């Protein structure tokens, strides 16, 4: 699935060869082999290049499609395709897609998904999670958790009516303060390369569940400071067991008790 982007559209040459019914057909000449942008099927290109014999490859090519439309098209084509990273698909949608296509892709979840995405972006810029979240889902990046995993972990928080009703800046500030409190309460557990549960998707799910309760207590106490959150986190110490991979939480890793 190829696209000749608008800035290059005037450099292609089309020659009409004839008509079949109401359909016109012909040939399109491109200036060079790297002229069109591969919107989908990129992984097959290398295979054809390495093939021992010439192979006629059928393609679909659009001319002049803008980048936001490319992202929409990629999402539509791959929304049901197995093996395509959900992080990559949502990352493209969040950056490029129109509001209408976001509504189609996320349906009734749109607002909460957008909120979860905004929270993850903010945490990746302003907390211990800086440069530790894989936004594209591409393997081998050595990041603790990917975008989709973090967004899923936030699901119980963004679905909470009290939290969702807060002003946008307050919601971001609450999550930022919570993770700053977490990083001071368990600095070793949140350090890179420790193997801690807290640096894995399961641990982030547990932490976000704790955050939901912490926020409600802070609201009742009228104190959402980092110091108050750290004090409230003390009550979870026996449960999380320093986020030790061999501790009390370990039997629940992997979706069920071992």
Image (spheres, grey):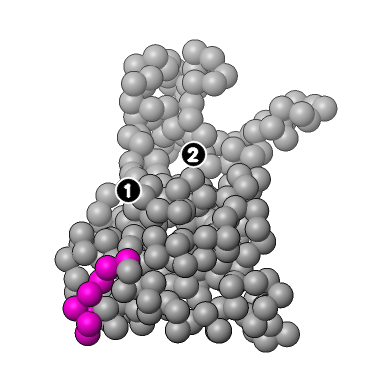
Residue 56, given in percent of the width and then of the height, sits at: 67, 31
Report which quarter residue 82 is drawn in.
bottom right
Left or right, 96 with respect to 203, comes to left
Quarter of the picture containing the C terminus is bottom right
Residue 204, given in percent of the width and then of the height, sits at: 50, 68
Front residue of 28 and 245: 245
Between marks 1 and 2 in the image, the one whose residue lies nearer the viewer: 1
The alpha-carbon separation of the residues under discs 1 and 2 comes to 14 Å
Q: As displayed, is residue 70 above or below residue 85?
A: above
Q: Total number of numbered labels?
A: 2
Front residue of 114 and 150: 150
Q: As displayed, is residue 172 above or below residue 67?
A: below
Report which quarter residue 213 is drawn in.
bottom left
Q: Is residue 223 magenta?
A: yes
**Label 2 belongs to which residue?**
39
Q: Do we see residue 190 in this rendering?
A: yes
Q: Do we see residue 78 in this rendering?
A: no
**Which class describes the residues within 10 Å of circle 1: few (<14), some (14-19), or many (20+)?**
many
Residue 2, given in percent of the width and then of the height, sits at: 49, 34
Determine whether label 1 and label 2 are within 8 Å by CB: no
Q: Is residue 8 magenta?
A: no
Q: As displayed, is residue 149 above or below residue 31?
A: below
Question: In the rendered structure, which disc, 1 or 2, sits on the residue that comes first in sequence?
Answer: 2
**Label 1 belongs to which residue?**
97
**Which class describes the residues within 10 Å of circle 2: few (<14), some (14-19), or many (20+)?**
some
Report which quarter residue 104 is drawn in.
bottom left
Q: As displayed, is residue 167 above or below residue 239?
A: above
Residue 64, given in percent of the width and then of the height, sits at: 34, 29
- Dot 1: what SS? loop
Q: Residue at x 49, y 39 (%)?
A: 39
Residue furthest right as drawn: 52
Q: Which residues are magenta?
A: 219-226
């Amino acid at each position: 699935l190829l696209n000749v982007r608008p800035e290059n559209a005037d450099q292609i040459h089309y020659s009409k060869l004839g008509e079949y019914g109401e359909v016109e057909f012909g040939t399109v000449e491109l200036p060079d082999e790297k002229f069109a942008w591969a919107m989908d099927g990129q992984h097959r290109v290398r295979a054809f290049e390495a093939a021992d014999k010439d192979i006629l490859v059928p393609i679909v090519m659009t001319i002049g499609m803008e980048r936001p439309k490319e992202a929409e098209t990629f999402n539509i084509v791959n929304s049901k395709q197995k093996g395509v990273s959900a992080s990559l698909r949502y990352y493209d949608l969040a950056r490029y897609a129109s509001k209408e296509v976001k509504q189609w892709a996320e349906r009734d979840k749109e607002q909460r998904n957008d909120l979860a995405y905004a929270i993850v972006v903010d945490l990746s810029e302003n907390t211990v999670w800086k440069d530790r979240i894989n936004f594209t889902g591409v393997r081998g990046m050595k990041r603790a958790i990917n975008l989709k995993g973090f967004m899923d972990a936030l699901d119980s928080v963004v679905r909470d009516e009290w939290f969702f009703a807060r002003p946008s800046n307050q919601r971001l500030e609450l999550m930022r303060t919570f993770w700053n409190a977490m990083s001071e309460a368990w600095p070793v557990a949140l350090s890179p390369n420790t193997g801690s549960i807290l640096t894995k998707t399961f641990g982030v799910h547990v932490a976000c569940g704790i955050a939901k309760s912490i926020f409600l207590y802070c609201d009742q106490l009228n104190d959402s400071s980092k110091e108050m959150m750290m004090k409230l986190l003390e009550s979870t110490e026996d449960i999380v067991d320093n986020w030790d991979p061999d501790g009390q939480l370990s039997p629940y890793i992997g979706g069920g008790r071992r």
